[in-house]
Image (cartoon, rainbow, N blue to C red):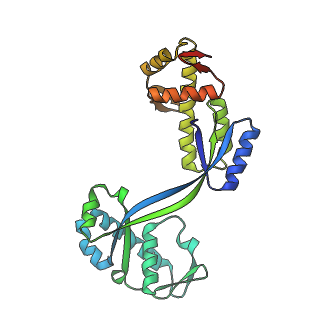
Amino acid sequence: METVRLEVLSREDMNELSRKLSRAGIMNRPVEETKPEIEHYLIVRGKYSKLVELSPKAPILGEELEAIQLAYEELMRDWEVGQEKPLSELFGEPDLSKLSLITALIGEGAVEERDGVLVLRNKPPLDNLELELRFPIDELEEELDELDNLNATLITEYTLSKHYYVEVLEVDRELLENALEIAEEYTTDESLVEATFDAIARSVLAEKILELAEKHRRKNELVEALMEIEPITVETDGDRVNIYYDEDTVEDFLKTLQTLGYLKVKGNRIWV
């Protein structure tokens, strides 16, 4: 049965969220999946000064080098030789340019990593640093060939990781809204946004099917009536959601509604 799926970060969160939903009378099931994550990068290596010479051939390379220059100036301005800095201070937020720079400084011996802190040993000129810059292929678009012409190396990273979900087995709008409210404390932001629109679409489609099923007691007539009004448009909080589906999707959704007890389908007949 198709469900609204909420991703959480741990097995503990998954089990706790599932228990809270159950206590609220919301049918659900915890699900664990092991899935691969595959990412492709083009890696460009070289001294900063040499890469600057090559940058006119690939504008995205020039943009990255400018970001590294800014990171270098910031670090050297606020970091004295011999001073220790915790990683949390250097990386207040994710910054790939700064990470590339720190990696180059460590490789040069200018920065030493010790007991969770970094110590600046000297301040080498930026031009002399050997950099390794990585560019996600899915962000390159038309610049893929330009970087490849700079003798870039293709690297693929394959990560096998466990993912934890709670699937909400409901189509009722009020129950889904309650589930999303309970899940806010546990689920990832991205998952909650996707689940919110999924819940809106499912509840609206379910309501429309049940409404039309009161008039069309034959399944083929009901499916035909649904296809005539596709897509269904709904306004929510100032946003417009367009709900698209096909005949196979409607058939599956009818099975879901039957499983949940909203209607009964036998042959070509429908009972609500």
Residue nearest the viewer, comparing 52 with 195: 195
Give above or below for 55 relative to 125. above
At x 33%, y 65%, the residue is 63
Percent x, y for residue 182?
68, 42
Residue nearest the viewer, comparing 172 with 123: 172
At x 46%, y 63%, the residue is 158
> In the rendered image, which quarter contains the C terminus?
top right
For the view shown, which residue lies furthest in the front direction? 267
For the view shown, which residue lies furthest in the top direction? 215
Give above or below for 69 relative to 222. below
Percent x, y for residue 71?
43, 72
Direction from residue 228 to residue 112 in the image, left or right: right
Percent x, y for residue 89?
56, 72
Direction from residue 26 to residue 81 in the image, left or right: left
At x 27%, y 59%, the residue is 143
Direction from residue 191 to residue 47 in the image, left or right: left
Residue nearest the viewer, comparing 254 with 81: 254
Q: Is residue 204 visible?
A: no
Q: Is residue 1 visible?
A: yes
Give above or below for 52 relative to 120. above
Occupied quadrant, residue 25: top right
